Image (tube, rainbow, N blue to C red):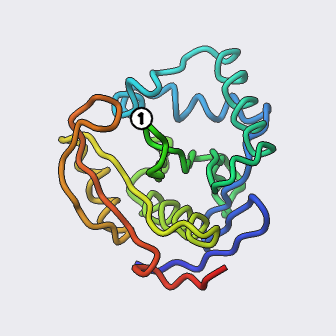
């Protein structure tokens, strides 16, 4: 699946989505994602369910500040807005996977109201473009067995299944990889 991707600094845009740094005023909308049990169950132990607005505000403030830190790699967390109405409907990440942070993980979560529209694969594709345009050669998605939506989304992005491991997060996970050559991304 191919999506048009535009990158302007730390903002990434597709035909339907804008991925941008988090702001403190995103906290209430973020609760519609991270406060949902059906979302949070796939994130533990890395992150549990958040149901307190003050806690969510602290988290999104920290995520927003991370965009100001140069790690030397294209890592970060983005709020995802629906371009049709400007509503915050999701979250996307490129983060170093434990234990060493060498492998980069693509992650994305959406409010249940946004499910079923192919937005996860569109966001994942955009994040991969961002990573590859910053000289990364490959990215990974790790998915718990039984998370059929996560597995399907990784495949829709064009990721290939490379196996199962307990290397990351000390959990049994399905590992998917996408290489730079798998997408039409010009060299930086």
**Residue 106 spot, x, y in % from top left:** 47, 53
In the rendered structure, the answer to whether residue 76 lies left or right of residue 69 reads left
Near mark 1 (Cα within 10 A), the count class, few <14, some 14-19 or many ≥20, is few
Residue corresponding to mark 1: 99
Q: Position of residue 11 (x, y in %)?
A: 74, 60
- Considering depth in this image, is 49 or 96 the residue closer to the camera? 96
Observer able to see residue 115: yes
Q: Is 68 left or right of 20, judged from the image as shown?
A: right
- One can see residue 105 in this view: no
Q: Secondary structure at mark 1?
A: loop
User: From the viewer's perspective, is residue 5 above or below residue 65?
Assistant: below
Q: Quadrant of residue 136?
A: bottom right
Residue at x-position 60% and y-position 70%: 135
From the viewer's perspective, is residue 168 above or below residue 106? above
Question: What residue is drawn where x is 49% and y is 66%?
Answer: 122
Residue appearing at x 62%, y 63% in the figure: 17
Picture residue at 69% right of the left edge, 47% below the top: 71
- Could you tell me which quadrant the N terminus lies in? bottom left
- Camera-side residue of 165 and 5: 165
On-image quarter of the C terminus? bottom right
Measuring from the top left, give residue 29's x and y in whole percent: 65, 35
């Amino acid at each position: 699946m191919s999506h048009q991707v535009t990158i302007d600094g730390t903002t990434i845009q597709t035909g339907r989505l804008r991925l941008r740094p988090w702001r403190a005023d995103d906290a209430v909308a973020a609760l519609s994602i991270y406060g949902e049990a059906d979302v949070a169950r796939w994130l533990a132990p890395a992150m549990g369910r958040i149901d307190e607005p003050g806690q969510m505000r602290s988290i999104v403030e920290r995520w927003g500040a991370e965009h100001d830190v140069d790690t030397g790699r294209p890592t970060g967390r983005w709020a995802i807005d629906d371009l049709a109405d400007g509503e915050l409907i999701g979250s996307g990440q490129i983060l170093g996977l434990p234990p060493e942070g060498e492998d980069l993980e693509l992650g994305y979560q959406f409010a249940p109201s946004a499910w079923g529209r192919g937005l996860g694969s569109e966001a994942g594709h955009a994040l991969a473009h961002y990573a590859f345009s910053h000289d990364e050669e490959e990215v990974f998605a790790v998915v718990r067995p039984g998370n059929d939506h996560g597995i399907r989304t990784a495949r829709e992005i064009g990721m290939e299944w490379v196996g199962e491991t307990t290397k990351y997060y000390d959990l049994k996970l399905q590992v998917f990889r996408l290489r730079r050559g798998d997408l039409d991304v010009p060299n930086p």
